Image: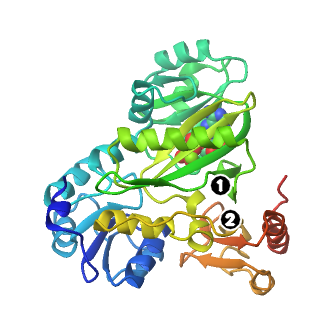
Amino acid sequence: MSSLEKSGPLLPGGTVGVLGGGQLGRMLTIVARRMGYRVVSWVGGPDHGPAGMADVVIEEPFDSESGLHQFLEEADVATVEFENIPRDLLERVAEAIPLHPGAEAIAVCQHREREKAFLSLNEFPCAPFWIVDSAGTLAEALAQLPANGGILKTAEFGYDGKGQLPVTSDMDAAETWEKFDAPRAVLEEKIDLGGELSVLVVRDQRGALVTYDPVENFHRDHILDISIVPARLDSAILEQGREIAVGIAEALDYVGILAVEFFLSADGTLLVNEMAPRPHNSGHHTIDACETSQFEQQLRAIAGLPIGSPRLHSPTVMLNLLGDVWVDNDQCPDWSGILQIPGAALHLYGKHEARRARKMGHITFTAPTQGEALAGHKKGRALLGIPEFE
Ligand SMILES: Nc1ncnc2c1ncn2[C@@H]1O[C@H](COP(=O)(O)OP(=O)(O)O)[C@@H](O)[C@H]1O
Ligand SMILES: [Mg+2]
């Protein structure tokens, strides 16, 4: 039982501490403020826009003692909106105030090697992999790689496909390892994909748990492009995805919202890709299309309040807006056409500067039927000049 549970829930008026300064923290802050909480965001560097919604923004680096002191002075409970928070900082925060999810669960999800070890130990299915920490171990792994090749991924700090390199068994290991330039990595077999999905699960401090409807995801250049709910995949696969996500949340003794990303191989096998110990891009539709958003669930879980219904009330398609659609990288598109599409909800993250591949916002298209949601999305992406999908 956490200290929070012993002392009862954190009620509105209390202060939620958020580690990280991106859009996930911003959307959590919007909900927290709507529900009467204060928010302190520790960004760990200059705020580039999204954290501006918090009551207090701390820009000092994550190894700053005065930053930690201020964060702990302000916050009653803490959470992360970004998994790459140094583990020792997570542990120090958790010694002082309740941190949800716990430091250990975040540590597992922030490091691909620990994540793979956790999945294997608990017998959750994942792609065949090899741990690589030298040219020699890479050579051994490459020799075992099947013909379709693999993807070399840094153990830490990867996101949106960064820190990843497609490899094949005929590549020179010494040269590749030098070029890759990371202390540790995981080499994963490249899966012949039949699809990708994710399952969001919320677990409260008493172990009560709900899952959202599984989400069908499509990536472009390794970055999430769109998410479709309900997923148009076999219902037995979706049920299996939910069961695995629940099993992972329980095995991690998780509190808060957890996203589990899956590969569905072309032959119909479901494999866990990775976990995110925070709200997730593929859960943004929950703001406009579900009874309780993923951000509100995170707030409720960390505050010790009952979690809400995850019920989907409208079919939906979520389209990511990358900096690529900004004119000359600083002028935002004219949204007039988008705003005339029935059921289109525009979300922008307040980032000061647009850059190629940078997530600037998203649009959720909800409609009475899935066909209409897909059609609205198609129209929206054409208006913005985003290459066609499917
Ligand atoms: N082993 C793999 N086989 C096939 N596709 C992959 C593999 N690993 C990654 N990808 C593709 O790249 C995307 C991003 O990779 P992921 O490991 O989820 O990293 P990130 O941390 O950037 O989200 C995946 O969603 C998938 O589309
Ligand atoms: Mg991913």
Q: In which quarter of the image is ligand 1?
A: top right
Q: Look at the numbered disc 1 and say if its residue's Cβ is closer than 8 Å to ligand 1.
A: yes
Residue type (three-letter) at the residue carrying disc 1 = Leu
Ranked by sequence position, the earlier of labels 1 and 2 is: 1
Q: Which disc, if any, is residue 309? A: none
Compared to 166, does 78 lie above or below?
below
- Can residue 143 be seen by looking at this rendering? yes
In the rendered structure, are the residues bearing label 1 and label 2 in contact, judged by CB atoms less than 8 Å apart? no
Q: Residues within 10 Å of mark 2 (few under 14, many from 20)?
A: many
Query: What SS does tag 1 mark?
Result: strand
Residue underneath mark 1: 224
Query: What SS does tag 2 mark?
Result: strand
Across and down, in percent, residue 261 comes to: 56, 45
Kindly indicate the quadrant of the structure image that contains residue 9.
bottom left
Q: Measure the C-alpha gap from mark 1 to mark 2.
A: 10 Å
Instruction: Name the side, left or right, on which 123 lies relative to 359.
Output: left
Compared to 334, does 225 lie above or below?
above
Compared to 215, does 333 lie above or below?
below
**Residue at 63 percent of width and 17 percent of height:** 145
Kindly indicate the quadrant of the structure image that contains residue 12.
bottom left
**Residue at 44 percent of width and 22 percent of height:** 134
**Residue at 75 percent of width and 50 percent of height:** 232
Q: Residues within 10 Å of mark 1 (few under 14, many from 20)?
A: many
Residue underneath mark 2: 318
1 vs 2, front mark: 2
